[in-house]
Image (cartoon, helix red, strand yellow):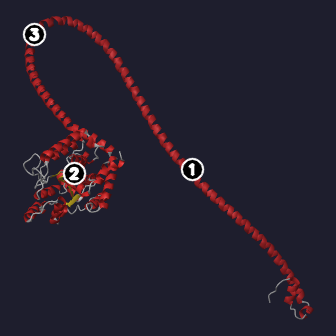
Amino acid sequence: MNSGSGPASLLREIPRAGLRSMVDQRRPIVVILGMHRSGTSLCSHVLSALGVDMADTVAARNSEETAPDNPKGHWERWEIVDFHDRILGLLNRPYAGIGHDFVFPVAWWADPRVASVRREIMAFLERRMGNGQFGFKDPRTVRLLPIWHQIFADLKLAPKIVYCIRNPAQVARSLHARDGLNRDLGEYRWLSYNTDFFRYIRAHEFCTIEYESWFDERLNNLAKLRAFLDLPAEQDDSYIDDAVSEIIDGELRHDDSSFDAAGHPLIRSIYKLARRAQQDAGARNQLQNIAAEFLSFQQLQAAFQRDSEHNAKLAARVPGLEQGVTALRASLDERNARLDAARLEFATRDSQLRELETEFADVRAALAAEVSALRNAAAKAEREAHESREAAGLLQSEYSETRAALILTEQRETEAVSSLQREITELRSALSRAELSVRTAECRVAEAEQNAEFAERKSSEAARNAADLESRITTLTTELASARKVGRTALQALRVVSGTDAVLREPRLGWRQKTRQLFGIRVNP
């Protein structure tokens, strides 16, 4: 067979108009997706006013009245909610449990139990869907989209997805008020739901409706929904606008301005991207990449997940243990009651015993005579016993003396031990003082060694200075002796010069110049 004759080549041979007609033959189904507390109930209520079959009842589950947290109704199909809760229970991911935020098991949709529930959902839709616009809303659908893709394919349904989104900080605040959920965990749950939405949405088109816009741009939201869902516009829509304005009650909006943004920057970034993902393909691709990376991060939580499930199992055993304790307490109360009955019976038996004691006294009187007869025999035995007691007294006296000596010896040994301990303590104290004295002496010796080293350096320096001084004195003494010798020679020469007229009369040379010439000595005038 030619490789080009497969399904792809067959699709290429069908005109585009034919493909469009084939797609249009699929039955539409409106699916409202989004995190809890994101306006999904409000959007479902509005679509019901626009003519879409969104709910069978507006009351709370298993009740004839609306819930306080949604006074205008949840606008859900409780059968689908129950199907979803069953699947979450099979996967150990119930909404009310902390395990709900963990990643689902691998290929969870292939679990036979989940497949069985999926077939029940399909049977419900085939039985319930009519020829008109049909839809449903349940936030849990976001996390279960893989089985819904199978349902859409098997039933040939064309999903019209409305994506409801709200500020994650306000969602966390609302979850905390309704369910007591920690705000950080509420923001993390918002992150899980919205990343699952972009992971599973694939190439499906969707219409983004922001919760906050219902109160400021109501008509714009109505126009978007009508255009996206191909809802026919009536000639006079004033009654629709009035109905929707009554549905959107500003007093039921409980946003708190102190929760204007999520705490984690990743959640803030995803919220900004999600708001423009419908029109911005780049933002949508970026969100799908983040969703894939976030899935890898969630898979790293497997160890924490196992610990959490183990703790949950332990917690699940607590009610049974409490029932056991209650049963034990009831058994204890019953045992106490039996004990009280036994005490009452004991009192009755005690009364009977006293009556027997009275009878015994009579018997004792009768036996007194016999006792008197026996006393004589007992007297003899008493004497013998007395002699035995005297012998025992001597033994007791010896025992007492021995015990006293032993006690005295123990006291002396105790005193000796105490004295020895005191001596040991004094020796330890003396040893400590001696060690302190040794350390002090060592410090002083070290200081003395330092001082001696310093003195030695000073002495060496003084010796060098003295040697230099002595050398200089010797040099100066030699120079002084030479100077004195030269001076004496100069004086003698001066005397000779002074007495020589010829020298004095010699032209052009004075006596000073002559002296310098003869002796090399400069004489000051």
SS for tag 2? loop
Please state which of the two labelled residues, at mark 2 or mark 3, is closer to the viewer.
Answer: 2
Q: Check disc 1 and report the residue beneath it.
A: 442
Amino acid type, callout 1: Glu
x and y, in percent, of residue 356 in the image: 9, 14
Q: In this view, does 506 lie above or below 487?
A: below
x and y, in percent, of residue 76 in the image: 14, 51
Closer to the camera in the image, 209 or 515: 209
Q: Check disc 3 and report the residue beneath it.
A: 363
Label drawn at residue 258: none
x and y, in percent, of residue 2 in the image: 36, 47
- Point out the image quarter for the C terminus: bottom right
| Relative side of 407 to 144, left or right | right
SS for tag 3? helix
Closer to the camera in the image, 67 or 492: 67
- Cα distance, mark 2 to mark 3? 84 Å
x and y, in percent, of residue 281 in the image: 30, 61
The picture quadrant where one finds residue 392 is top left
Q: Is residue 1 above or below residue 354?
A: below
Please state which of the two labelled residues, at mark 2 or mark 1, is closer to the viewer.
Answer: 2
Label drawn at residue 181: 2
Decide: few, some or many residues near mark 1? Use Cα within 10 Å; few <14, some 14-19, many ≥20. few
Amino acid type, callout 3: Val
